[in-house]
């Protein structure tokens, strides 16, 4: 199957099962689906709409939401700017140490978040590798909003890079070569051909990066601390809410759950529709 006249392969659409086969597969899938769905439904059912609205207008809740949205958008933007060249490098070139670079990109995904926090502290903390230099120029990163962005960037950026690599690899190289033969510059080829054709993968990677950054906890609490109004993101406010105000914890859990579900659902819908346009 071809898309837009190019030779790029796209997946065949899912089968529409009916009858006994469908019911058997659905029955076999049900335990796992219920295991995932029931806890999420329980969170949504725990708080009433009026209680949700009341908690949303509390100052520390609004601060946590605002801080989370602003820092994750910054982290996602930085990921796009600095991660795109890395993804293009991995997708298009073979070089000594490529496997090492690829492993380095994968590592934050599998590392425990607390390890990420310790690593950032050892690199940018006052006693870290760059600590004395940063202090000499008057910069302090740990326990600031910058530290929040650093923690989110560290743990979430690989999701974009891995998705972007796949997107760049799927672009038909013959289209790029034809444009080059017609005199198009490398930048124009990237802007007019490579980027538009890989856009679904780039978009998916950015959304997954943003969603992962939104839920970042372990690295943030170690490297940035949990200071209301300054470094307290929604996951950190949920953690503190279990000790102080359970309704706040549930409210923020509902907010995070709703945002994550809506974004991922809409993304899957848009990408699915684009993928199967022939």
Image (cartoon, rainbow, N blue to C red):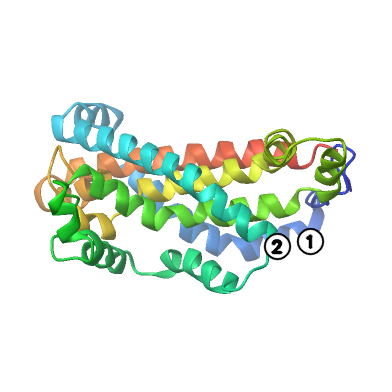
Q: Which residue is mark 2?
A: 25
Residue at image position (81%, 37%) is 277
Residue at image position (60%, 50%) is 164
Residue at image position (38%, 51%) is 153
Q: Position of residue 218 (x, y in %)?
A: 27, 60
Between 184 and 82, which is closer to the camera in this rendering? 184
Circle 2: is it few (<14), some (14-19), or many (20+) Cα within 10 Å? Answer: few
Q: Which mark is residue 21?
A: 1
Q: How many marks?
A: 2
In this view of the protein, can residue 49 be seen by the observer? yes
Between 131 and 172, which is closer to the camera in this rendering? 131
Residue at image position (41%, 38%) is 258
Q: Are marks 2 and 1 in contact (CB under 8 Å)?
A: yes
Q: Is residue 55 left or right of residue 87?
A: left
Q: Position of residue 204 (x, y in %)?
A: 58, 44
Q: Is residue 74 left or right of residue 85?
A: left
Secondary element type, mark 1: helix
Q: Mark 2 to mark 1: distance in Å?
A: 6 Å
């Amino acid at each position: 199957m071809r898309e837009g006249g190019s030779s790029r392969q796209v997946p065949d659409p899912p089968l529409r099962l009916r009858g006994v086969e469908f019911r058997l597969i659905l029955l076999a899938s049900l335990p796992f689906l219920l295991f995932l769905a029931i806890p999420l439904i329980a969170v949504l059912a725990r708080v009433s709409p009026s209680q949700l609205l009341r908690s949303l207008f509390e100052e520390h809740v609004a601060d946590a939401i605002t801080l989370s949205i602003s820092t994750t958008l910054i982290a996602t933007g930085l990921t796009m700017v600095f991660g795109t060249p890395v993804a293009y490098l991995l997708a298009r070139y073979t070089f000594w140490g490529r496997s090492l670079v690829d492993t380095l990109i994968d590592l934050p995904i599998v590392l425990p978040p607390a390890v990420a926090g310790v690593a950032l502290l050892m690199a940018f903390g006052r006693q870290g590798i760059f600590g004395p230099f940063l202090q000499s120029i008057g910069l302090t990163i740990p326990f600031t909003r910058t530290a929040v962005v650093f923690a989110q960037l560290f743990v979430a950026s690989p999701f974009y890079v891995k998705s972007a690599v796949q997107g760049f690899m799927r672009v038909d190289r013959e289209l790029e070569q034809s444009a080059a033969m017609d005199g198009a510059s490398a930048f124009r080829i990237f802007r007019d051909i490579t980027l538009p054709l890989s856009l679904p993968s780039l978009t998916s990677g950015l959304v997954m990066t943003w969603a992962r950054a939104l839920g970042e906890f372990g690295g943030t609490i170690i490297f940035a601390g949990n200071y209301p109004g300054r470094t307290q993101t929604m996951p950190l406010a949920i953690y503190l809410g279990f000790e102080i105000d359970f309704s706040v914890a549930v409210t923020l859990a509902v907010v995070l759950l709703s945002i994550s579900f809506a974004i991922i659902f809409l993304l899957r819908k848009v990408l699915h529709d684009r993928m199967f346009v022939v």
